Image (spheres, rainbow, N blue to C red):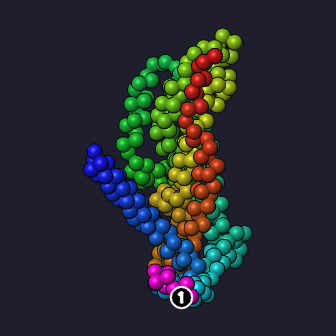
């Protein structure tokens, strides 16, 4: 019996060590590129060859040489600068611009992302509510059509979209670009919201109808508040979808830069503003809105709000 317990303890200890080693390796693989980007964004010059990593400090740390660590840290921080961020936030392609290039591209991307989020949440919620609560002719066929549309990515129709937008004068129009994102997001998000709303007991609708509520009141006063978690999830996805998209904006808005398009100019060796280190700074800064949205909307993505809603 004692031998058995020893074997089990060894087994559990070995498994614990293995799991933590895997986690440490994954953590290293995730954090190393991020830390390298942070260091690169604070490095002087324009080329990646100017990035100096704190190898001396790390070697001293492995030798437990605290004096060497302090000296290496001081030597490393002496080379750090805000040069890339200053260039990023002040560069203007022309002197008559109201905003620097980066802030202008940032405002365009932010406008598209916010408008896309609002429209996708509203339209997907309406369509999802209809498919989850009503029976009508062609319902199954429409759902199958939505499912089939997910097989074809939006960039398959880029040539056709470009021709249509040019014909109707919608090129270089951020609002028109948003329509592409919205129409592409509705089928997928309709399935998500419909599946969530189908789990909401219909007896809530019936009880509200007995009390005199109409369909609009049932949707806005009962179903939508209970569906806030899934709508929060849809909102996060809708915000992130156009934020770093490059293909569609580069074709539909050739004269108006979004963040992704402008950052590509920084990483293009043939461009006039080629600066990989400024690209690192810009790539880090554009993660701030995504982080804010994720942190704020995380409290909405809590499933189980309908637990017990049909009781009492």
Q: Residue at x 57, y 39 (%)?
A: 302
Q: Callout 1: few (<14), some (14-19), or many (20+) C-alpha neighbours within 10 Å?
A: some
Kind of element beneath mark 1: helix
For residue 231, say whether it is visible. no
Residue 39 figure quarter: bottom right
Residue hosting label 1? 68
For residue 276, say whether it is visible. yes
Most extreme residue toward the front is 2
* Quadrant of the image containing the N terminus: top left
> Residue 3 at x, y = what percent?
27, 50
Q: Write down the region rendered in magenta.
A: 59-67
Q: Residue at x 40, y 33 (%)?
A: 145
Q: Residue at x 64, y 31 (%)?
A: 225
Give the answer, above or below, for where 67 lies relative to 234: below
* The stretch drawn in magenta includes residue 63: yes
Q: Main secondary structure of the magenta part?
A: helix
> Residue 222 at x, y = what percent?
64, 25
């Amino acid at each position: 019996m004692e031998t058995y317990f020893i074997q089990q303890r060894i087994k559990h200890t070995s498994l614990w060590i293995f799991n933590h080693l895997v986690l440490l390796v994954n953590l290293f693989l995730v954090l190393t590129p991020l830390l390298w980007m942070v260091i690169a964004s604070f490095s002087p010059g324009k080329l990646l060859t100017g990035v100096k990593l704190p190898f001396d400090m790390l070697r001293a740390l492995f030798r437990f040489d605290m004096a060497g660590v302090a000296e290496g840290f001081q030597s490393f921080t002496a080379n750090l600068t805000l040069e890339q961020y200053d260039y990023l936030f002040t560069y203007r392609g022309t002197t008559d611009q109201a905003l620097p290039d980066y802030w202008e591209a940032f405002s365009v991307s932010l406008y598209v992302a916010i408008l896309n989020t609002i429209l996708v949440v509203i339209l997907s919620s309406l369509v999802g509510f209809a498919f989850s609560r009503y029976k009508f002719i062609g319902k199954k066929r429409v759902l199958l059509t939505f499912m089939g549309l997910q097989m074809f990515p939006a960039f398959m129709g880029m040539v056709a979209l470009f021709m249509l937008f040019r014909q109707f004068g919608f090129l270089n129009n951020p609002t028109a670009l948003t329509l592409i994102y919205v129409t592409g997001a509705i089928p997928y998000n309709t399935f998500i919201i419909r599946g969530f709303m189908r789990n909401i007991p219909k007896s809530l609708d019936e009880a509200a109808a007995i009390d005199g509520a109409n369909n609009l009141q049932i949707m806005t006063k009962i179903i939508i508040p209970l569906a806030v978690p899934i709508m929060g999830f849809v909102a996060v996805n809708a915000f992130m979808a156009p934020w770093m998209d490059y293909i569609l904006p580069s074709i539909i808005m050739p004269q108006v830069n979004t963040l992704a398009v402008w950052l590509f100019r920084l990483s293009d060796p043939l461009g006039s503003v080629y600066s990989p280190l400024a690209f690192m700074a810009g790539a880090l800064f554009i993660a701030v809105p995504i982080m804010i949205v994720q942190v704020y909307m995380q409290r909405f993505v809590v499933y189980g709000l309908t637990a017990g809603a049909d009781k009492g």
